[in-house]
Each structure stands twice: as structure tokens, then as C-alpha cells.
Image (cartoon, rainbow, N blue to C red):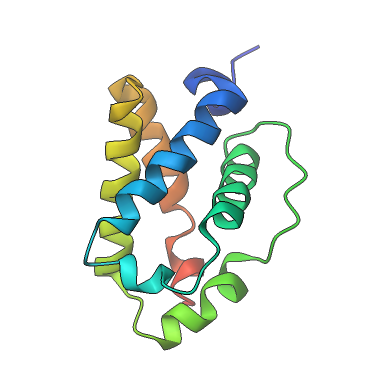
Amino acid sequence: MNPTLFEKIGGKEIVEKASHFLYVNILSDERINHFFQDIDIEKQKRKMSAFLTYIFGGPSLYIGKDMRRAHKHAVEGGLGDEHVDAMMECVRKALNDLNIDNDSIDEVIETIEKHRDDVLGR
């Protein structure tokens, strides 16, 4: 049986670390950090870890909002493709910092990309 993406990148520990580094990167990125000004980042990290575990094929009880509802306010505030692109750069950097191999990083990016239209409400 082929390993899931969750297993390939290192499981729960790596997903949690990646979520942490992702928000470190996001908060230092002036293109997108304003979308997170009034967000409880620790809570957001937990939600992101659960969501990533779910979409990467790991054991998750993700019960958060769907992507359209979760990002509706941000879209109304101007969230667009350029912001998603910046976030994807932050994802790639976080995974590089964790020494994840390039093929797995590309698979992560591809998996997250599948949610772009829902995030942007289209």
C-alpha cells in the first residue's frame, strides 16, 4: 500500500511544526499578515494542523468551516490570488526549513492548490 502524503512528510509532528513555521512566515510577510491581525494564531495553528492532516490523508477529525465560509470575510476584505500565492510561498519556505524533500513539497503545494477556488469563493 502506498503511503499517504501525511506519512511521506513525517506525520503529525511534521504537520504541527509546518503549521507553526507557516504562521511565523505569514506574520512576517507584509503582503498577507494584515489578514491575520485579529486572529488567535495559536488556535489558527491547531486548525491548520487538523486541516492539513485531513487533506494529506492522515487521521483527522477536522470539523472546521469549509474553505468558502472560513475565508468569506477575508475575500470581502480583498483576499485574492496574489495573497494565496504569497501564502503558498510561506508554505514552501516552512517545508524547506523542515528539510522536506522537493517532491513531497511539490505534492503538498499541489494538494493545497486544489482548494484555491474555494478559499477565494469562486
Residue visible at 57% across and 73% down? 68
* Above or below for 27 versus 119: above
User: Outermost residue toward the bottom?
Assistant: 76
Which quarter of the figure is the N terminus placed in? top right
Q: Is residue 104 above or below residue 54?
A: above
| Percent position of residue 21, x then y | 39, 40
Query: Residue at 57% of width from left, 36% of height from top?
Result: 56
The picture places residue 22, in percent across and down from the top left corner, at 39, 45
Q: Quadrant of residue 11?
A: top right
Pick the front one: 74 or 44: 44
Quadrant hosting residue 12: top right
- List x then y, in percent, for residue 17: 48, 32
Q: Give whichever of 34, 87 is nearer the camera.
A: 34
Number of numbered tags placed on the structure image:
0
Where is 32 relative to 103, above or below? below
Q: Is 49 placed left or right of 104 in the picture?
A: right
Q: State left or right for residue 99 relative to residue 42.
A: left
Asked which quadrant contains residue 84, the reply is: bottom left
- The residue depicted at 54 percent of the width and 49 percent of the height is 45
The residue shown at (30%, 47%) is 90
